[in-house]
Image (cartoon, grey):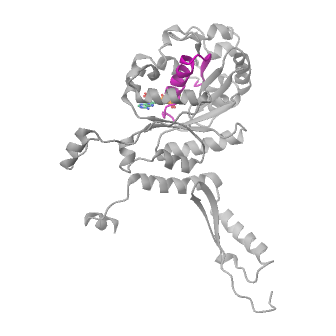
Amino acid sequence: MARAITITSGKGGVGKTTTTANLGTALAMRGARVAVIDADIGLRNLDVVMGLENRIVYDIVDVVEGRCRLRQALIKDKRLPELCLLPAAQTRDKDAVSPDQMIDLLAQLRSDFDFVLIDSPAGIEGGFRNAIAGADEVVIVTTPEVSAVRDADRIVGLVEAAEKGTPRLIVNRIKPRLVSRGEMLSVEDVLELLAIDLLGIVPDDETIVTSTNRGEAAVYDQTSLAGRAFLNIGRRLNGETVPFLDLTDQPGVLDRFLGMFGRRRS
Amino acid sequence: MSFFREFFGGRRERSAETAKKRLMMVLVDDRYKLTPELIEQMKVELAEVLSRYLPHVDADQIEVSLLHEDDNDRLHAQIPLKRGQQGDV
Ligand SMILES: Nc1ncnc2c1ncn2[C@@H]1O[C@H](COP(=O)(O)OP(=O)(O)OP(=O)(O)O)[C@@H](O)[C@H]1O
Ligand SMILES: [Mg+2]
């Protein structure tokens, strides 16, 4: 029986889709059967982040409107046969799927998978409500910025009101250098403000850009610190205890050299 | 003021500290949605209840504020008490 986990945020653009793609891949790499659902209807994105855009025939709206069976709409990942994507419709509006239809859909998926990850749209309206409707657990992604944290707090309240338990938090795009200079909220700050449990910390990392360009998850890239962070989060979702990455800023030789002249690389 | 302090070598607060303080205020506001009218009403009712136990609790003297401290939100109320004359309860 699959656990259905919704990845949501409040503020847009904080990394939900990136997180869903990487966690789905991370879990499948460890042998789990995983379905990822793009619930951002009208703004289909998860397919391109996973590099599967050319394989789409049917989408989630085709399934709920009976034009195809669920199995026909599920797209197999290029590398991992146990990873499947249910794409969003690109041309329909957000309420083309109802919360009840979403719950039905998850009921069908549960028996064939170990994890179902749902990529939620930003905001607190219909699309978000659909995305959490059938969830067993909710994960909130935020960046360490005032507006993102504020919106995350709003979502914590809504998730609790919807009786989905207390969501867990991923702090994305941490810049250790800025944090150590006191110019970016630290993970501890964010946790103290939101008062929920931490699931993971993901650094701001250029390899996210390059891997997204290629349509390959960053977890495949051995050199990617963000990829490692996502692998760790996948293991935590699996119930393992994994220490958080140490992202404290350790200035390199060049920095210390520049430091002698009172300059710092940013 | 702060301009001069900065200009004459005083240090400006780190922006993360500022962000955290701002968020502390914003989040308690967002979470409890206490309008000024509701706060006034709460003071009147607080005074009403407390007057059953204590002499001379005056709604106008009560100050309440919402704070976020160490992972917890709290309602902080300052309620000045006047000493009652004996027998005057
Ligand atoms: N850790 C990271 N380091 C660098 N760039 C990142 C990181 N996480 C996300 N990004 C970039 O931020 C942008 C937004 O990410 P993403 O699309 O995953 O956000 P989202 O929350 O799904 O957005 P939306 O609300 O529009 O659905 C993308 O360009 C992505 O590559
Ligand atoms: Mg997205």
Which residue occupies the foreground of this view, A50 or A259? A259
> Which residues are drawn in magenta?
A12-40
Residue A155 visible in the current orientation: yes
A123, above or below A31, in the image: below
A153, above or below A93, in the image: below
Residue A108 in the magenta stretch? The answer is no
Number of disc labels: 0
**Horizontally, is A71 left or right of A210 in the view?**
right
Q: Quadrant of the N terminus of chain A?
A: top right
Horizontal and vertical percent position of residue A143: 48, 39
Which residue occupies the foreground of this view, A69 or A190? A190
Which residue occupies the foreground of this view, A18 or A53? A18
Horizontal and vertical percent position of residue B77: 65, 69
Q: Quadrant of the C terminus of chain A?
A: top left
Residue A43 visible in the current orientation: no
**Picture quadrant where residue A206 is located:** top left
B18, above or below A69, in the image: below
Horizontal and vertical percent position of residue A162: 71, 38
Q: At x 41% / y 39%, what residue is drawn? A: A247
Farthest left residue?
Answer: A261
Residue A21 in the magenta stretch? The answer is yes
**Horizontally, is B22 left or right of A109 in the view?**
left
Farthest bottom residue?
Answer: B86
Q: At x 52% / y 8%, what residue is drawn? A: A55
A171, above or below B45, in the image: above
Horizontal and vertical percent position of residue A35: 61, 18
